[in-house]
Amino acid sequence: MESIKVLVGLASCGIAAGANKVFNKISAIKDKEQLSFQLTKTGCVGMCYREPLVEIIDETGSYLYGEIDENKITEIIEKHIKNGEPIKEYIVKTDLFENADDSFWKNQVKIALRNCGIINPENIEDYQLYGGYKAVKKIIENNIHPEQVIQTIIDSGLRGRGGGGFSTGLKWKFAYNSKSEQKYVICNADEGDPGAFMDRSLLEGDPHSVLEGMIIAAYAIGATEGVIYCRAEYPLAIKRLNIAIEQARNKGYLGKNIFGKEGWNFDIYVKEGAGAFVCGEETALMASVEGRRGMPRKRPPFPAVSGLWKKPTNINNVETFANVPYIILHGAESFNKYGTEKSKGTKVFALTGKINRGGLVEVPMGISIQDVIFKLGGGIQNNKKFKAVQLGGPSGGCIPEYLSNIPIDYESITATGAIMGSGGMVVMDETTCMVDIARFFLDFTQKESCGKCTFCRIGTKRLLEILTRICEGNGKDGDIETLEELSQQIKDSSLCGLGQTAPNPVLTTIKYFRHEYEAHIRDKKCPAKSCKNLITYTVIEEKCTGCTVCAKNCPVNAIEGERKQIHHIKQDICIKCGICFTKCKFEAINLS
Amino acid sequence: MRIQRISIENKISTKNNKIDLSLLDPIIEKYKTKKGSTIPLLQATQQLFGYIPKEAFEYISKKTDLKASELYGVATFYAQFRLKPVGKHIVKICHGTACHVQGVKTITESILDTLQIKDGETTSDGFYTVESVACLGCCSLAPVIMIDEEVYGKLTSKTAINIIKEIQLKENN
């Protein structure tokens, strides 16, 4: 039994689904019965829709169990670990037989996420067992020149994974060319896009790969200090990063004369963000690290020339750094063999919304959006109709169903009006109102605008007001044109990415779903039946059996009626949550 | 704009029990000499008191090179900082895209309705503070709320309210 490994996925989402309870249960049984299998924590394998996940590796192979609770795990320990009989019905992935969920993995290529869900993120030895820190050692042992390191990254075709899509190698080259005694490397882990959790999963599942990527960048550009700017909303990521940094220091991988190389000093510390979306913009981020209000400034000078504390600075995103050790270790070709002509390698996406298999996927560039949603993601929840997919968060846009066969690469996605973004992919079905989605994002950007540029500060507010009015059924003729005009002005007159891209959700929804805007404005109707002012729920008297289910489930007690009598919805109390609609077994609730 | 999120009035701090500002001394000592430590300094202050009392700005300013206006400017810029005391437990309702699509709006309304407060307010018994936040990063479990450090996912209005009521019941007994 000593050779059996039991891994429990303990990333934030796993914990939220109850993975801690499962872990404690296994631990308790292990202690009580003095069982000798190895129990380890690991990060997220990406199968979030099956959390909590437990993987058992024995001499016959690996078995991933999904949706595990305390009862199921007791059964698994009894049958599988003690008696060597895997429980087929709970298994969601194994190499030994086919599984309904196999298509989730088929088209994935794991480079950035190569260790997530496999290693124990709180153990540096585990990372090293899987090739960790070998890329830096390769550089040191073969005395590879920084210029050569930069050339490898340029050759790999790696582009900024935070959304910008600028060549990582070129960025490094600019910083390398700036002459200064002191330079900085910053890791942007201020993952602010609502609907995105790629960086969180990476930091929670494999923090050392990010550190190693930063160490390589520091070597390439000649930096002496590294900063990881992480959202305060990610306490577990921060905790694991700090553990990883401490372990790397103890090994001599961070600090003075690192990796035994005389005179090579580089250390990293974590800076907690304080909640401002605009700090994802690099000049705002640096202002925040310096302890000021996170407001962007004009470029040039670019950070590569004058960045943090006015020193040359290189900023990359978490996922970008995680790719670096792999590229250095295996060569540029190992990365650029995937992808399209201009977009190389893989991209991590957080698949969420009205999709059957929500989770984290890493796919080669060039795969179509449709394949990601239907092959990997298993299609739309409850057999509803696929309407659109939102890419790039508040800076991105909605791509309609009929364009979903386009390949995922920077240029094709930009051509639709959306952006690649950092990897949030929110799937929407026929019940999602596109005007409401635009309103949702403008509500977000309006709150997050730092206020420096007038058009961003006031323009987004005006956009929001118009969109809110339309959603409430008070739209006027000419509203669409005003939205379009104002959007263009905001794009033209804002200093940073936030303002320049804030109107994208409005523009793309108008471009592809103009008819929904028109229905709201002219007919005072919400085609998706989602905008609350434009819908009513009523009981269809002929169908109501008086079962009281709707009344019992109504959160505001707006439904009255005796058992076996026809029920009624009090319109003045109804908050239009739709619970009665979904709970009624007799389809006796009408939505109009 | 950011600043609108935090109300400038600071009524409760005056009627509250005296705030022992000397508790700040070790924090100030720790960050005093480090450059760029305004944010960690304010974060530590908030951790100590649960919010940043008005008096703390002046106190820190007197003991460091930082201007009170500068500190206040930073505190009002970032969503994390609170200038008002908070309840015993903080309920953060995620308003990320996934949660929005999955109907967190109705859940928010039901929670606020049950607790009889508005977004950002504290219940009269000081037990809960409810605030809407941007994405908590647990999108596959949407809709999600976070009570203190614990995340609850795949909620409906009913289950969300039950969780909130249960915590209060448990502690009251």
Image (tube, coloured by chain):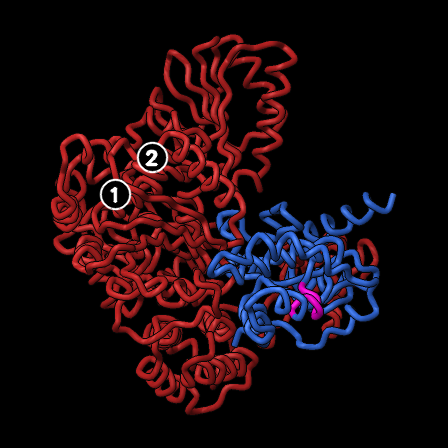
Chain colours: A red, B blue
Q: Residue at x 53, y 63 (%)?
A: B38
Q: Chain of mark 1?
A: A
In x, y percent, where is residue B134?
53, 61
In x, y percent, where is residue A556?
75, 63
Q: Does residue A540 lie above or below A219 as drawn? A: below
Q: Residue at x 58, y 62 (%)?
A: B80
Farthest residue in the bottom direction? A477
Q: Residue at x 39, y 32 (%)?
A: A100
In x, y percent, where is residue B19?
78, 62
Q: Which residue is mark 1?
A: A216
Q: Residues within 10 Å of mark 2 (few under 14, many from 20)?
A: many
Farthest residue in the right direction? B173
What kind of element bears circle 1? helix
Amino acid identity at mark 2: Tyr
Q: Nearer the viewer, residue A404 or A2?
A: A2
Q: Residues within 10 Å of mark 1 (few under 14, many from 20)?
A: many
Queried whether the magenta region covers residue A314, the answer comes back as: no
Queried whether the magenta region covers residue B55, the answer comes back as: yes
Q: Chain of mark 2?
A: A
Q: CA distance from mark 1 to mark 2?
A: 11 Å
Q: Residue at x 58, y 42 (%)?
A: A16
Q: Is residue A513 visible?
A: no
Query: Magenta span: helix, strand or loop, mainly?
Result: helix
Q: Is residue A28 visible?
A: yes
A72 horizontally vs A358: left or right = right
In x, y percent, where is residue A458?
47, 85
Instruction: Between label 1 and label 2, give the one nearer the viewer.
Output: 2
Amino acid identity at mark 1: Ile
What kind of element bears circle 2? loop
Query: Which range of residues does the magenta coloring cover?
Result: B52-57
| Mark number, residue A253 | 2
